[in-house]
Image (spheres, helix red, strand yellow):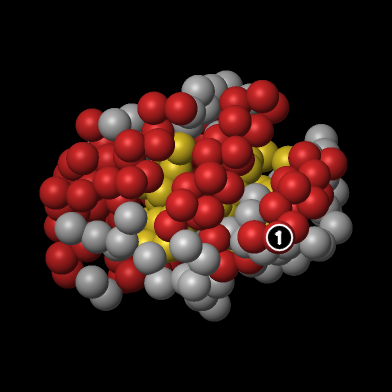
Amino acid sequence: MTFFDFHHHKENKAHGIYNLDYEKIPPNYLYSIGIHPKDIQPKNIDDQLNWLKSNIKETCFAIGECGLDSFVEIDQKTQEDVFLKQIKIANEVKKPMVIHCVRKFYEVISLNKHAEQPMIIHGFNKKQNIADDLLKNNFYLSFGKAVLYNLSLQNVLKTIPLNRMFLETDNEDFNIGELYQKVSELKQISLKQLNEQILENLQTIKNG
């Protein structure tokens, strides 16, 4: 069985969404493209946004990863401005968004009102109350390697509706089949059911 990797950084991986780094050339397989908070160049924002828009090719699945990060040096206002501009681009091209968020969940939720396309928080590993608030605001959650060993996160995942989740490797080096196996056990469904549901979710966000 082949398992879809919602967000990864490995080139030439067929079944998943490749995260295209800033200023790289788009591949001929599924990818996402965005300006990560750490890559924002305050004096060159227009050029960065032009790079983004001009590289939304046929195999582009999503805008991202983009979002807000409390640990990067770029000031909050600039981060929010660049994030909002990418939300507007996603609206224009009708692509879902892969969201990077570090300790800025409620700010991301507040900006969600501008989005017309689905937003997916990638690498989610926070507490139940944050998961609940994100779900109430129509976000999807993508889970990674932490599910394999983090008992608290496993308990959170058990409460997430199957039609609101994705699974990913991000930049970790492990077999995503292990993650699918673990999640199928936690959700008490078959691997086949889980795999089919993830693909259905993918189709849902693709259609907006």
At a point 60% along the width and 38% down the height, the residue shown is 85
Q: Residues within 10 Å of mark 1 (few under 14, many from 20)?
A: few
Query: Quarter-wise, where is residue 103 in the image?
Result: bottom left
| Residue 136, percent from left and from top | 23, 31
In the foreground, 86 or 33: 86
> Residue farthest to the front?
43
Pointer 1: what residue? 43
| Residue 188, percent from left and from top | 22, 47
At a point 55% along the width and 35% down the height, the residue shown is 87
Which amino acid, mark 1?
Lys
Query: Quarter-wise, where is residue 110 in the image?
Result: top left
From the viewer's perspective, tell me whether residue 166 is left or right of residue 41: left
Query: Quarter-wise, where is residue 147 in the image?
Result: bottom left
At a point 26% along the width and 75% down the height, the residue shown is 149
At a point 81% along the width and 62% down the height, the residue shown is 24
From the viewer's perspective, tell me whether residue 64 is left or right of residue 161: right
Seen in the picture, residue 46 relative to 175 is either above or below; the reply is above
In the foreground, 188 or 125: 125
Seen in the picture, residue 21 relative to 47 is either above or below; the reply is below
On the question of residue 98 being in view, the answer is no
| Residue 12, percent from left and from top | 77, 62
Q: Secondary structure at mark 1?
A: helix
On the question of residue 71 being in view, the answer is yes
| Residue 175, percent from left and from top | 51, 70
From the viewer's perspective, tell me whether residue 176 is left or right of residue 154: right
From the viewer's perspective, tell me whether residue 171 is left or right of residue 194: right
In the foreground, 204 or 38: 38
